[in-house]
């Protein structure tokens, strides 16, 4: 159950603002959307989850919410992203509506649908389940015919609004129309409006030579230009809240003009909004861009972070704060931070004060994937089993990448790890395995030597070999007797002293004997995690 006294989390602040500015309503509509012009990356995902968090905050207050996500798949295909296959085929479809560009992978009915399906498949994994709207379907079904006619009737007024924030050089020149047309013959938008009869009839000509007179109530290829289309849909869908990126929220940007269009042309107050900032990838310069192909998507993010931690990354950061997603050693700290938040939320670890507790508790609540039948935040039945991410990575590497074996070892060592807690632990194990194998720096990775390999012994001098024999016989042989890492470490140092080696030298020799490197995980805990039988086999060569 969510907190009875909702804290001043930014999502709660926004929910309160929506209720205050829009008044009490039987249902609030929160909107998000994007053009599927390329891979939908985690920068785009920031808007989706920002809306989801506000939706959660409204529902936690007992409000009914409609959460819509618009696929702007009737936009023009303007540029071929560099990370797409079959570039020639895609280039042949430039200026087509995205929904009519073929899928270069051959999996889905169109290029747009391929990207939509990828997102729709992954969003439920992180607890996001909006109502999807497909603008190509809506426009081709003439759902907005009356709204398009209204824009044509207010053409002069719309031109004035759009010019309001432009300097003289960038004001609209010559005849201007608030609509664009995809040619019925060649399907491209390289068309010009010739005439509007003041009612439902529009005439156009295309550079391909085709000319036509179409009825707005039946036409398949007419759509509003972006800065009119967006506010039109606010009124059409009765939108109460929609955020936008800082490019749209710039002075005189599309949100400024949309606000005027919405009020003065469509008689609808603009939705409550906020600006969200860009997201970077640590080690990669600049913002992500679908058109450039320089992106990381949600599926890739979920290979490293569990669904709860993906939500935590965004719930714990204000939307107007730019931040980077890390795939390096920072991953370990992010897991540690989440685990600490979880312990505070469950009262296992004490927060600095009540305000800190309320903040951490609310972030934790909004990080959870599950919701109840009313869409309200739902916490796990009990505190999940916590294993430090660094330790889990070591355990999985010790188990030669076998996550099941790593979990079985944890279960054998700790009766508190019941069957009900294993599914969540396995999800974390899979992330730890992927990160250790694919993302971790080389010094973090290791593979235990195989006792059966004929060349499995390290190239050690006589003194080091003797020290390994001493480590085996005086420490490993009784490894199970050590109550903790500290007592084991004391025995290791004593073993080094008896062998006439400094501790540092013995550590290097031990890591070479075990994993063929000069460094590795903290030795005492490492030995205890590997276990007596396997250690004795590896060190038998000494």
Image (cartoon, grey):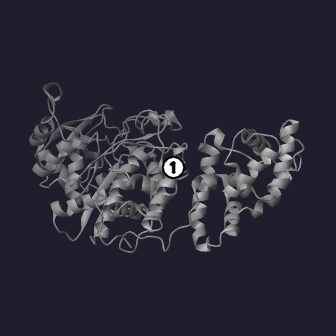
Using the image as rendered, state which of residue 51 and residue 176 is in the foreground: 51
- Viewer can see residue 399: no
Crowding near the residue tagged with mark 1, few <14, some 14–19, many ≥20 C-alpha atoms within 10 Å: few
Using the image as rendered, state which of residue 491 and residue 339 is in the foreground: 491
Which residue corresponds to the image point at 20% horizontal and 64% vertical from the top-left? 19
Q: Is residue 461 left or right of residue 181?
A: right
Q: Is residue 386 left or right of residue 512?
A: left
Q: Quadrant of residue 192?
A: top left
Which residue corresponds to the image point at 48% horizontal and 39% vertical from the top-left? 282
Q: Quadrant of residue 423?
A: bottom right
In the rendered image, the quadrant that contains the N terminus is: bottom left
Find the residue positioned furthest to the top. Answer: 169
Disc 1 element: helix
Using the image as rendered, state which of residue 384 and residue 426 is in the foreground: 384
Question: How far across and how far down the image is residue 492, in percent?
Answer: 75, 50
Q: Quadrant of residue 371?
A: bottom left
Which residue corresponds to the image point at 49% horizontal and 35% vertical from the top-left? 283
Tell me: residue 210, above or below residue 366: above
- Viewer can see residue 329: yes
Disc 1 target residue: 333
Tell me: residue 273, above or below residue 23: above
Q: Is residue 84 left or right of residue 499?
A: left
Question: How far across and how far down the image is residue 366, in percent?
Answer: 39, 62
Question: How far across and how far down the image is residue 288, in percent?
Answer: 42, 38
Using the image as rendered, state which of residue 243 and residue 454 is in the foreground: 454
Question: How far across and how far down the image is residue 258, in percent?
Answer: 19, 46
Q: Is residue 303 left or right of residue 239?
A: right
């Amino acid at each position: 159950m969510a907190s009875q006294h909702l804290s001043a989390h930014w999502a709660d602040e926004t929910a309160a603002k929506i209720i205050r500015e829009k008044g009490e309503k039987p249902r609030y509509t929160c909107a998000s959307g994007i053009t599927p012009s390329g891979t939908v990356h985690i920068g785009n995902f920031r808007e989706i989850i920002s809306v989801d968090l506000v939706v959660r905050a409204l529902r936690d207050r007992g409000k009914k919410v409609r959460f819509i996500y618009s696929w702007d798949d009737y936009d023009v295909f303007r540029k071929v992203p560099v990370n797409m296959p079959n570039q020639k085929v895609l280039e042949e479809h430039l200026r087509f509506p995205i929904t009519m560009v073929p899928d270069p992978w051959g999996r889905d009915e169109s290029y747009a649908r391929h990207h939509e399906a990828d997102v729709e498949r992954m969003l439920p994994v992180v607890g996001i389940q909006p109502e999807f709207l497909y603008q190509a379907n809506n426009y081709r079904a003439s759902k907005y015919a009356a709204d398009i006619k209204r824009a044509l009737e207010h053409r002069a007024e719309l031109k004035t609004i759009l010019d309001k924030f432009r300097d003289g050089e960038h004001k609209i020149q010559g005849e201007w129309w608030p609509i664009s047309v995809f040619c019925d013959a060649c399907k491209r938008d390289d068309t010009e409006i010739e005439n509007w009869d003041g009612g439902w009839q529009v005439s156009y000509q295309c550079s391909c030579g085709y000319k036509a007179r179409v009825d707005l109530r039946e036409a398949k290829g007419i759509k509003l230009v972006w800065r009119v289309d967006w506010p039109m849909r606010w009124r059409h869908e009765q939108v109460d809240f929609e955020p936008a990126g800082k490019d749209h929220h710039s002075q005189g940007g599309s949100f400024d003009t949309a606000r005027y269009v919405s009020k003065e042309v469509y008689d609808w107050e603009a939705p409550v909004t906020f600006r969200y900032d860009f997201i970077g990838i640590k080690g990669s310069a600049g913002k992500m861009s679908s058109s450039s192909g320089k992106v990381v998507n949600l599926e890739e993010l979920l290979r490293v972070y569990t669904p709860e931690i993906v939500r935590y990354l965004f719930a714990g950061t204000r939307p107007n704060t730019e931040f980077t997603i890390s795939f390096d050693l920072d991953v370990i700290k992010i897991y540690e931070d989440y685990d600490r938040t979880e312990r505070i939320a469950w009262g296992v670890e004490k927060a600095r004060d009540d305000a800190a507790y309320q903040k951490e508790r609310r972030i934790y609540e909004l990080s959870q994937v599950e919701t109840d039948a009313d869409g309200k935040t739902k916490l796990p039945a009990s505190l999940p089993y916590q294993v430090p991410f660094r330790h889990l990575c070591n355990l999985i590497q010790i188990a030669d990448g076998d996550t099941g074996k790593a979990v079985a070892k944890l279960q054998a060592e700790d009766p508190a790890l019941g069957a009900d807690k294993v599914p969540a632990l396995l999800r974390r194990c899979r992330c730890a395995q992927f990160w250790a194998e694919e993302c971790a720096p080389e010094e973090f990775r290791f593979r235990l030597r195989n006792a059966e390999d004929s060349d499995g012994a390290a190239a050690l001098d006589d003194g080091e070999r003797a020290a390994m024999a001493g480590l085996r016989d005086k420490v490993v042989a009784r490894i199970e007797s050590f109550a903790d890492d500290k007592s084991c470490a004391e025995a290791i140092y004593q073993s080094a002293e008896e062998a006439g080696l400094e501790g540092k030298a013995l550590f290097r020799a031990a890591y070479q004997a075990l994993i063929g490197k000069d460094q590795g995980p903290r030795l005492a805990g490492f030995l205890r995690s590997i276990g007596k039988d396997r250690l004795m086999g590896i060190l038998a060569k000494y």
